[in-house]
Amino acid sequence: MTVSFRMLLPMLLLCTAGLGRTETVLGVYIFQRHGDKVLAPAQLTDLGYAQMFLTGNYFRERYVSAGSSRRISGISTDFVELGQLEASAPDDDVIQTSGLAFLQGLYPPVGSTMATETLRNGSSVQAPLNGYQLIPIQTLQVGQDSENNPWLQSTISCSKAVISSNNFFSSAEYQSLLRSTKPLYESLAPLVNQTFQPEQLSYKNAFVIWDLLHVALIHNSTTTFPASSILTDAVMQELLGLANSHEFNLAYNASDPIRAIAGKSLAGQVLTALNRPINTVVPLRQMI
């Protein structure tokens, strides 16, 4: 599903257009994956934590901050109002922690002054962590432990979609790429031989091979993963393109719509969510 820097943030807005360029943003649906992570057992890195916090802060500046021209109508700016926001994530450590980091950026700590409450007896209580705001994330069973699985389709419960995806492996396109890219993947053996057996070095494992090398180039020292003339920028770009095509074809086929059932389900959720700000008495402003 995600094969670049492992963070996907497509966003759909429900807007009402007025005269000229004026508009009123009534609600926002944000779909995000996660930040930088290490391989199985998958966990969010400090870099990934920072990425997600900054991403949340970006959306804060765009849709929550008081001075934004795109501020969601009626949204609370400093203190989160849980009735205005709903967050959910699969039962997966990387995605859950990414969600927490994102929400920290969206509604950061309010500071000791704003986070102090005076009780009836006159004493004052200051919230912990400089007014850290607690935002619950609803846990979904769909996609459970997905980031420890090299193929995200295997985490869904639609057997017909899984069968459809497997049909890609018998297609002419797959067989052609398997043959034409064999020399490329075999040339990577000195770099990945501690993880992959020789028979695994092929287009069949396009994503996991690219992911391993991508993580190594970010986190491994030059001692544990020395620079190599084999792994040029051009080669990494080619591996990324192959990984993208591999994952795309496992998730979509124009003549076999069931393969894209996960995307269709997401589209339905988006439409349902974006109707809530206008069709409910107490509108939900954000879904994450």
Image (cartoon, rainbow, N blue to C red):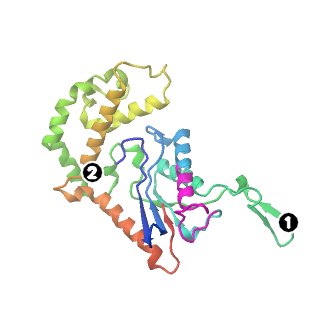
Residue 83 percent across, percent down from the top left: 56, 71
Q: How many marks?
A: 2
| Residue at the limit of the structure toward the front, as seen here | 20
| Residue 113 on the magenta segment | no
Where are the magenta residues, as a range? 55-77
Depth check: 37 or 71 in front?
A: 71
Q: Residue at x 27, y 51 (%)?
A: 251
Q: Where 4 falls versus 29 (above or below)?
A: above
The image position of residue 273, as x and y in percent, is 42, 69
Q: Amino acid at mark 2?
A: Ala
Considering every residue shown, the one lying at the far left of the view is 172
Q: Which residue is mark 2?
A: 251
- Outermost residue toward the right in this view: 122
How far across and how far down the image is residue 210, in percent?
35, 34
Q: Is residue 56 left or right of residue 119?
A: left
> 93 or 209, which lies in front?
209
Question: Which of these two is toward me, 132 or 14?
Answer: 14
- Disc number placed over residue 198 in the picture, else none: none
Q: Please, what is the three-letter code of the amino acid marked with disc 1?
A: Ser
| Foreground pick, 114 / 202 | 114
Q: Is residue 61 on the magenta stretch?
A: yes
Residue that numbered label 1 is attached to: 123
Where disc 1 sits, the SS reads loop
Q: Answer with the quarter of the image where residue 238 lies.
A: top left
SS state under label 2? helix
